[in-house]
Image: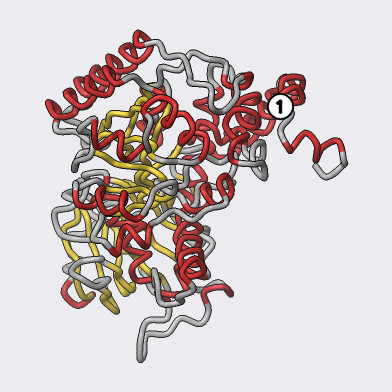
Amino acid sequence: MDIGIEHTKLITLRGSGLGIIDDGAISFSRGKITYVGKTGGLDTRELDVVMDGGGHVTMPGLVNAHTHTGLTILRGGAQDVPEIEWMNRALGPLAKHLKEGDQVLGSKLGVIEGLRSGITTFGEYAYNVNRLIREVYEPYNVRVAATETINEVVSDKTKMRPDQVYLLDSDRGNRSLDVTNELFDEYRNSDMVDILYGPQALDMVSVETLHSIRDCAIRERAKIHMHVAQGERERLQVRERYGSSTVKALDELDMLDEQLIAVHCHDTTEGERRLMVESGVSMVGCPSSIAMIDGMVPPVGNFLSMGGKVALGTDQAPGPGTHNMFREMRTISLLTKTLYRDPTLLPPWETLRLGCLGGAEVLGMDDRIGTLEEGKAADIITIDLSGPNLTPSVSRPFDSCIPNLVYSATGFEVDNVIINGEFVIRNGDFVNIDEEVVLEKARSRAVDIFSEAEKDWEEAGSLLVDMHRKGFI
């Protein structure tokens, strides 16, 4: 159908500002935007459906540039522990009890939550990501930049000291690399699925595998999506293996360039970040996750101030809790202001761009998404401004809805989600997704997973075990 939305406040993100158009209109046909401008300029005679956008903001869909949605089924299971414990002693004992199908169920849950809060593109990072593409993203009609995890670690990390170097198996890495190359062949001409290369972290793959990944990425003109300098555990591993920091080692390995998407980066020096920016590396910050897991603030503001490209992501639900980009925009703005004791940093107009166009640019998709422009993909959301938390919304002398969206929105004011020209959510309801069935299955399966993991969880002895024994959780 040819569809139009009129009498809405458009945030187009065109130009150097936000490209705000009062009493704006937008139309789309066959997956592409066909008109963006004032309502008076929209010819409605050829449209099949015309929607009244009064009292709404209409803007590009949000881009979640880094997420592990498959772990959403473990929400609430790994947080409030020392960073050195989080992966091996808190998350690990639970994750080892995930069975076939749990990753898909968790991903459905995470994607549903993300869609509800206006995310239209997910930077998915997972083992067997092909299953998530076929069983979640394609059936749900959701855009995805998919990364198959390449990890060669064979050690049982739950029983190792943090400074004991992991044992690696290159055959394991090569198998995952083969899977990635097969995905490129399968989705090379897809409008909805992009493929990225995914060495999980510098301490989890061999030098030989890293160089193979780099060569493949050059051949495919693809991005390398990698966790970089994500805390003390990695720092200890890299120091033992390379005798230096993650960024310095990556530089020596010729891995710092415009193909690298570096996720997290909070365990870097300012000099290392400058080297990354000058080398063309882009960054994804996951503020809620890193605040919860590491007690630190991702260096988003510093990276931006040096001229670097930055996007935002939700990471995984066990830890930060949600897949909600409005929450991430608010969190990074507040944490950055607090970190530098400067309330002018990361104002809402900058943060809103990070949540949309920033993600598109970092993932290499800004030729298709991230702004509302004629010819681009119709990835569009509408936001109802009538709720008490977004009231009042005024247009003179300035648009108060801009700070309100970043600081006051929950995300669930989104009532229409359109991806590639098709409604996924219409007037607050999913069009082709049975939300309640997924929620009920997730509730039931989580009970079994946590129960089956009880012995391993207790033996791992994280701080959460002590809190449980003392009656706090």
Q: x, y (%) of residue 142?
A: 36, 40
Along the line of sight, the residue nearer the viewer: 313 or 235: 235
Quadrant housing the C terminus: top right
- Residue at image position (34%, 52%) is 311
Q: Secondary structure at mark 1?
A: helix
- Residue at image position (19%, 78%) is 40
- Residue at image position (34%, 71%) is 349
Q: x, y (%) of residue 261?
A: 29, 41
Determine whether, in the image, residue 165 is placed left or right of residue 347.
Answer: right
Residue type (three-letter) at the residue carrying disc 1: Phe
Q: x, y (%) of residue 359?
A: 31, 51
**Residue 168, image quadrant:** top left
- Residue at image position (31%, 12%) is 174
Q: Outermost residue, front direction?
A: 243
Q: x, y (%) of residue 121?
A: 34, 45
Residue 22 in view (yes/no):
yes
